[in-house]
Amino acid sequence: MLQPNIESSNEVSFGTCSVLLLHHVILLIQSVGALSELICSRQPIVALAGDDVILPCHLEPAVSAGSETVVWNKPDLDPKYIHFHHDGRLMYQFQNPSYNYRTRLFVDELTKGNVSVKIFSVKISDSGKYFCFLQSLQKEASIQLTVGVVSTLIIHVVSNNSSSVVLQCESEGWYPEPEVFWLDGEGNLLSAGPTETVRGPDDLYTVSSRVTVEKRHSNNFTCRVQQKDINQTRDTHIQVTADFFKDLPSTDLIWGVIFPLCFAASVLIVVLCYHTLTDCIKRNSNKQVKKRGQTRRKH
């Protein structure tokens, strides 16, 4: 009688189990991946122009994205892709030229579900909304990036008289558009004139503001330029002492000093001219009287 080949049967059974187990593992991984959420920062990412910035995004629960096609795009661009990662490498042919050599993924952390992208030397034009997309998992999430520019401030005296001083604060090179405030030495808000704002061809803003302060013994004043979107504030200070009120401006100098001096000089010149003219008239009269007297004696 022929005996069944038990060894062969065991081999077939073991091979079948291995295939089934592998299939179940794959299904399990896929199901875990399907249950994972792609999460990017819900808070806007803020950076200053020239900084390197990370747009954080990850899978939760963490599953490997090592074999995933990871796409980062910015819809207002053409082409819209800032980073296209496929088969373990960056596909340069799909990338927007303005991001060439300025982006990278953390490749070593893709297996941990980290699909964050890093942008180097950000520019104002990089501001906007970005989307991360994982193709095979059909996952997508967005994140907002705000890029700002800040600058220094200058305060100078516009005019001053015996009772008040007009101060002007100016700062050029801000983005987005900032606000300007004046504060006294105790930090109280001062009433100032409207802020003048000019936007240049480089999209940067120049702002200036004036405030009139009354004469006091000694006062510290602060000009503050603030941009809340990028959480940036710059201050500069000036101390207004009694010395500021000693120098008169040009108009006061003319009417208060120069004009009276000129008037006095004019009066003096008129008086001198009058006396000189009177003396001349008297001399001429005396000469004519003498001539008449001499003429009569001859006759």
Image (tube, helix red, strand yellow):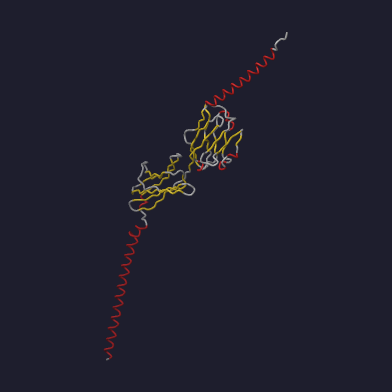
Number of marks in the rendered image: 0
Along the line of sight, the residue nearer the viewer: 299 or 78: 78
Residue sticking out furthest to the right: 1
Residue sticking out furthest to the top: 1
Residue 274 percent coordinates (x, y)? 30, 72
Residue drawn at point x = 31 percent, y = 75 percent: 277
Along the line of sight, the residue nearer the viewer: 16 or 206: 16
Task: Write down the quadrant of residue 284 in the picture.
Answer: bottom left
- Where's the C terminus, which quadrant? bottom left
Q: Is residue 47 above or below residue 211?
A: above
Residue 61 percent coordinates (x, y)? 52, 26
Residue 167 percent coordinates (x, y)? 38, 49
Residue sticking out furthest to the front: 1
Q: Is residue 293 above or below residue 150?
A: below
Residue 164 percent coordinates (x, y)? 34, 51
Task: Write down the quadrant of residue 234 in the picture.
Answer: top left
Q: Would residue 183 appear left or right of 296 to someone viewing this image?
A: right
Residue drawn at point x = 53 percent, y = 26 percent: 34
Residue drawn at point x = 32 percent, y = 67 percent: 266
- Where's the N terminus, which quadrant? top right
